[in-house]
Image (tube, rainbow, N blue to C red):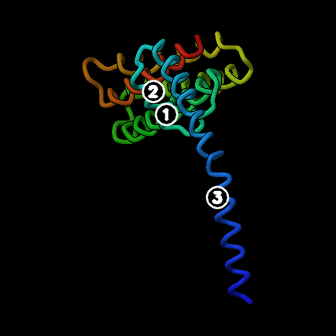
Amino acid sequence: MMTLIFLTKLIMILVCQIVFLPMGQCSIDFWPMDAKLIDETCQKTPNPNLCVSSLKSDPRSSGADVKGLGIIMVDVVKAKAIIGQNKVSGLLKQSPGDLRLKVGSGDYDAISNHQVPNASLAFSRDIPHIAEEDMSEAADEARACELSFSGRSPLTDVNNAVADVAAITAAIAN
């Protein structure tokens, strides 16, 4: 009796998988449309390859519109800015009197506590020109941090990364 119930359930599962498998395959066909929107959007940015790789690495990009892609990129800026803040904080512990690091700390504070939240809100409220402005300012803040050092700073990599993704996000808002 148990074997009969087991076999019945197994057959039902197999039938369901066979019947619904084509529907599952249909959903895969939507990804090329998403990829096309990502590619078209990123081609209008200063760094298309970084844009594409940043967006395609986030599962939210599947099915996102341009506004959604902008919100994802604001989150990328936020993540990179947190890395920058942490790096500046660590360096300030080693050299608490370094004015250049204090400038960088202020720059990253502005990015994390002002530009990122404002841009995110602007995208969600369909005010792209505000998002563009805030992300342009975020890129400028990261560049200002870098310029506060004469020559290569200990923050060059993170400053460049934040400036790059912020510039991409500003272009998407535009």
Q: Report the residue marked by disc 2.
A: 52
Q: Position of residue 159 (x, y in %)?
A: 39, 25
Q: Report the residue marked by disc 1.
A: 56
Farthest residue toward the bottom? Answer: 1
Is residue 109 visible in the rendered image? The answer is: no
Q: CA distance from mark 2 to mark 1?
A: 6 Å
Is residue 108 visible in the rendered image? The answer is: yes
Indicate the quadrant containing the N terminus: top left, top right, bottom left or bottom right.
bottom right
Farthest residue toward the left? Answer: 151
Q: Amino acid at mark 1?
A: Lys
Relative to 60, say whether 169 is above or below: above
Q: Residue at x 49, y 27 (%)?
A: 108
Q: Earlier in the sequence, mark 2 or mark 3?
A: 3
Q: Residue at x 51, y 17 (%)?
A: 40
Q: Residue at x 45, y 37 (%)?
A: 83
Q: Amino acid at mark 2?
A: Val
**Circles 2, 1 touching at the beta carbon (< 8 Å):** yes
Indicate the quadrant containing the C terminus: top left, top right, bottom left or bottom right.
top right
Q: Amino acid at mark 3?
A: Gln
Q: Earlier in the sequence, mark 1 or mark 3?
A: 3
Q: Position of residue 116 (x, y in %)?
A: 59, 26
- Tally of marks: 3
Query: Between 39 and 132, which is closer to the camera in this rendering?
Result: 39
Q: CA distance from mark 1 to mark 3?
A: 29 Å
Q: Position of residue 154 (x, y in %)?
A: 30, 31
Q: Which mark is residue 17?
A: 3
